[in-house]
Image: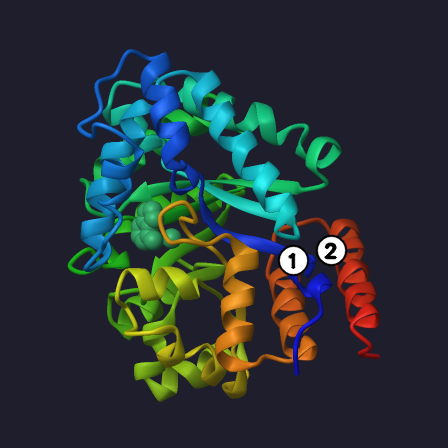
Amino acid sequence: MPISPSAALLPCAELHLHIEGTLEPELIFELADRNGIDLPYADLEELRARYQFTDLQSFLDLYYSNMEVLRTGADFAAMTRAYLRRAAAAGVRHVEMMVDPQAHLLRGVPLEECINGVAGVLATSLEEFGISTVLIAAFLRDRPIAEAEDVLRQLLAMDAPIAAIGLDSAEVGNPPEGFVELYRMASAAGLKCVAHAGEEGPAHYVEQALDLLKADRIDHGIRALDDPALVARLVRDRVPLTVCPLSNVRLRAVDTLADHPLPQMLALGLNVSVNSDDPAYFDGYVDDNFAALQRTFGFSPDQLAELAVNSVESSFASGERRAELLELIRAWRAAQGVS
Ligand code: HPA
Ligand SMILES: [Zn+2]
């Protein structure tokens, strides 16, 4: 059944989004120019030619290299505004955005430039773009554990407007178990906890993130399918898994979208949502992810709405905002002719 054009505007929450992964090539050149930075690429075409990835690390190398152009609060603000404009056109009505403050601090960019640059734009995003927001400070699992703890202390001391912490970067060989104290500190400070687990790493990293870090949500989690007992637990506890289909294809966690386990995950009763991860690098914002899923699997409007409802119910939005978002999805379903 062909999907109607309005399906592209399925209202949803985006729960797995790295703001630095929204840095489009054009903006990379603009910010490099503004900051007098010599890029190792002659032009856009040469940069775009680098967007061929073999695994997570091959992407991370380019991601960290490109973020060199972010120097001032104004740069972070420009990136955030560009994402929100595009996300609004994709149907996103609530976003829980990760930022990597540790990566910027390591480059000599003060935490204030990064955090205030992003948060200054988020403060008015509901009025400006119709998108409510939550900011998540993510920590780099392939850096020393004490460094992450020090950055969290600094964020807490400056009363940074973050609602949660996350764990990202190179997963294999960097299990959640090292970060127990970081998560304990965050939880004691009243922050929510999410963690990447089971993107490239094994199912037991997902278990560790739940048991040791007390994660409220798992970013990716697709490798959990290797362990039926873990799947049963995730279903029973309705643990949210923020799945990123186009990211998984581009980073070769799956061979092709047709091989992606999302339909199986839905059939198993897992609480999955659809997210873009690093949309500037993976050819797709949330609407592109939904459209690709619809094309590949022929998802019905009912299934698409279920994914959107999961995203809202798995969010850290207030009860009032969730009710508004669920009402938008209900109206979308009605417009699709689904009761
Ligand atoms: O897709 C990702 N995975 C892990 N770490 C990341 N940091 C930015 N994007 C990613
Ligand atoms: Zn991610």
| Dot label at residue 66 | none
Look at label 1 and name its amino acid: Cys
Q: Position of residue 155 (x, y in %)?
A: 42, 28
| Dot label at residue 12 | 1
Of helix, strand and loop, which one carries label 2? helix
Q: Using the image, determine if residue 53 lies above or below residue 81.
A: below
In the rendered image, the quadrant that contains the C terminus is bottom right
User: How is the model colour-coded?
Assistant: rainbow
Seen from the viewer's position, the closer of residues 243 and 248 is 248
Q: Which residue is mark 2?
A: 322
Q: Position of residue 334 (x, y in %)?
A: 84, 71
Residue under the image location 27 percent in, 26 percent down = 68
Look at label 2 and name its amino acid: Arg
Seen from the viewer's position, the closer of residues 181 and 127 is 127
The alpha-carbon separation of the residues under discs 2 and 1 comes to 10 Å
Q: Using the image, determine if residue 137 lies above or below residue 228.
A: above
Residue under the image location 29 percent in, 50 percent down = 179
